[in-house]
Image (tube, rainbow, N blue to C red):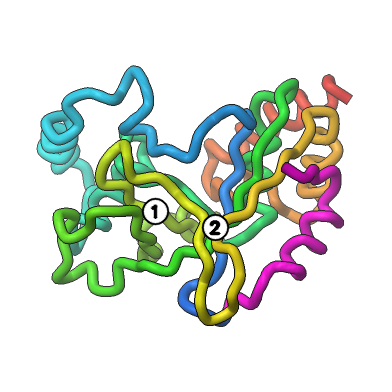
Amino acid sequence: MKKITSVQELLELSERLPSDDWVGGWFYRGQADVSWELIPKAFRPPYAKDFDFKYKMWIKQASRFSELSFENEFECMAIAQHHGFPTKFLDWSSNILVAAFFACSDQLKKDARLTAYFPTWYVTDPEVKEFKDYDDVVAYQPPPIADRIRAQLGNFTYHPTNESVIKNSIFPATQQDTLHEWIIPSEYKTSILKSLDRLGVNFKNIYPDIDGLSKHFCLMDEVNNAS
């Protein structure tokens, strides 16, 4: 995998990728440890057991909270994912800088991975479709059901089983690959975070609440101590 060492390289990279005008555009994901795979939390230990039962119980018990307001089962799972339940969704962003922030804001001593994925199969009618209608990875662009999802330009891929993995293919309209990956070496994480902070890409903006503000101050202390 090629390396990314600066925000300038991130911007140049996004300009080299094919146009976003086709389908729904590029999805970007940052993972703080390059060894982590592109699999939803529901399939990672220690969570990979009895998903259907646990998810039904979560919905039943979460129904007493006002945050659980949804129009279809895709929105419901997006809310569960947003609040930390291990679902079959994988988080992505339409903003490469947001993805890079997540890649750099944790595990400061480990190399990170940035992924660009161009989905060609989408949940286009969630009001009538159900999870059982999909047997492979499918993209889902949620409505702005939460401030963080809106601020992060959040998207998801839905993975029906642990064998449903992100794969590269060729998009016929542009004859371009649909999957690209890069390494962000650990020694560049803090400098990238500082540059992103100057651009307003930080916890206090992509987590637009008091928790995000607190996380911002904590991370900046870590960054300054690591420099």
Residue 64, horizontal then vertical, whole percent = 15, 40
Foreground pick, 186 / 147? 186
Check residue 124 for magenta coloring: no
Furthest toward the right, the residue is: 227
Mark 1 touching mark 2, by CB under 8 A?
A: yes
| Dot placed on the residue nearer the N-terminal end, 1 or 2 | 2
Residue 157, label in figure:
1
Residue name at image x 46 percent, y 47 percent: 91
Residue 66, horizontal then vertical, whole percent = 23, 48
| Badge 1 amino acid | Thr
As drawn, is 113 to the left or to the right of 91?
right
Residue name at image x 83 percent, y 21 percent: 226
Foreground pick, 124 / 162? 162
Which element is circle 2 on?
Answer: strand
Please give the range of residues in magenta.
Answer: 1-20
Check residue 18 for magenta coloring: yes
| Badge 2 amino acid | Tyr
